[in-house]
Image: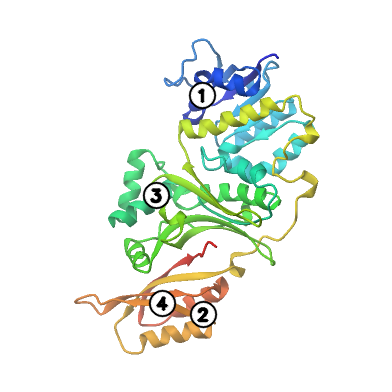
Amino acid sequence: MKPVKVGICGLGTVGSGSFNILLNNAEEITRRVGRSIVIEQVGARRDNDACDTSNINVTRDIFDVVNNPEIDIVLELIGGTTVAKELVLTAIENGKHVVTANKALIAEHGNEIFAKAQEKGVIVAFEAAVAGGIPIIKQIREGLSANKIEWLAGIINGTGNFILTEMSQKGRDFEDVLAEAQALGYAEADPTFDIEGIDAAHKLTILASIAFGIPLQFEKTYTEGISRITAEDVAFADDLGYAIKHLGIARRSKAGIELRVHPTLISHKQLLANVNGVMNAIMVQGDVVGPTLTYGAGAGASPTGSSVIADVIDVARTLTADPTNRVPHLAFQADSLSNVQVLPVEEIECGFFLNMTIKDRAGVLANITQILSVNDISIESLIQREREGSELVPLVVMTHDVKERNMNAAIAAIEALPDVAGTVQRIRVENLA
């Protein structure tokens, strides 16, 4: 059979990793596909010393790649959403299959892109868009296709996990660890997407759509970052038997779908609590299989390139298949996606960890517990410690499950008390079972 010809747009970290995997593992890939996969052209603004492109047709105009009639599969690895969207839609219009690692593009524009791909009978593959080298999309879309997915929860941003791990294991402050993460290249100069949860929200949006058969709805994903987490929060959580992790959580309930990214207390006994450093892990609960956990590298040239080329191999295998018999982009047939409601965060129930500073006076604790009681909030545990030489002391309260709107009302009332200093730190608690 004739070779499958690939065009690569972007030769940065993921592009270079994908380029080298195609060259270095060419023999193994050919054995898996039944025909060779060759790099026909590369579009990149500049060369990358990690790649030997001396025998490759290189262009500085990436649109040369998607307009090249010889190319079967386009790899969109430039990032961003503006040019990337135009590039992908042009490739689809030209009848080319697309492989991308672009989580923002899929989360924000995937519905439009998949509709166009369906119309043109081409594939858009995006395994590398979520959790780097972990084949979580294939696991949910194909390996767990016999299951009704009940919930999933994951550590899907390595930067945030590195920061929280260092804070937990070494008692360091957030700003100190963030600076180190930037120096090590784990965090960007502007780390907003990672530390404020936007990157994780893009990934969760994709996972939830595949798990529950709903359209991509990034704008409805509740997103909260880790920048307000303190070393004291981490220490108190540890004393209570919990780790703080930045989780993406999607859950199916009778009322609708929960989509949320936020700092979360999970028991030390949970496997996810022991995923440290820059690693990623996702738990998926199926009604038939029960809980599964997938763990691995969430970023980097080789891990993410591994997922990119796995998608290329899948596309190459299906080039002769009838488009109507291919695996659907979002796991469910396009005309069978559900319009089930995505719940506003105020309607979601979970436990809470509250960390506040109060004046060490009689009656203060009684006032706080009264406010919690009025809002139907039950206390699970409580810690109050002295601070020598200060009338201000920390108070930590763990609650049973309560609706978020009740907790919001209670916190507003507590912060209005004259004997409570500053704001109340609130972190959700999850029992992943």
The CA distance from mark 2 to mark 3 is 32 Å
Query: Which percent across, then down, holds residue 366?
Result: 40, 88
In the rendered structure, the answer to whether residue 417 lies left or right of residue 125 reads left
The amino acid on which the numbered mark 1 sits, given as a three-letter code, is Ile
Residue highlighted by disc 1: 21
The CA distance from mark 1 to mark 4 is 52 Å
The image quadrant of residue 98 is top right
Q: Nearer the viewer, mark 2 or mark 3?
A: 3
Q: Residues within 10 Å of mark 1 (few under 14, many from 20)?
A: some
Question: Which residue shows up at 66% across the image and 64% down it?
Answer: 253
Residue highlighted by disc 2: 377
The CA distance from mark 2 to mark 1 is 54 Å
In the rendered structure, the answer to whether residue 159 lies left or right of residue 39 reads left
Residue highlighted by disc 3: 276
Residue highlighted by disc 4: 381
Point out the image quarter for the C terminus. Answer: bottom right
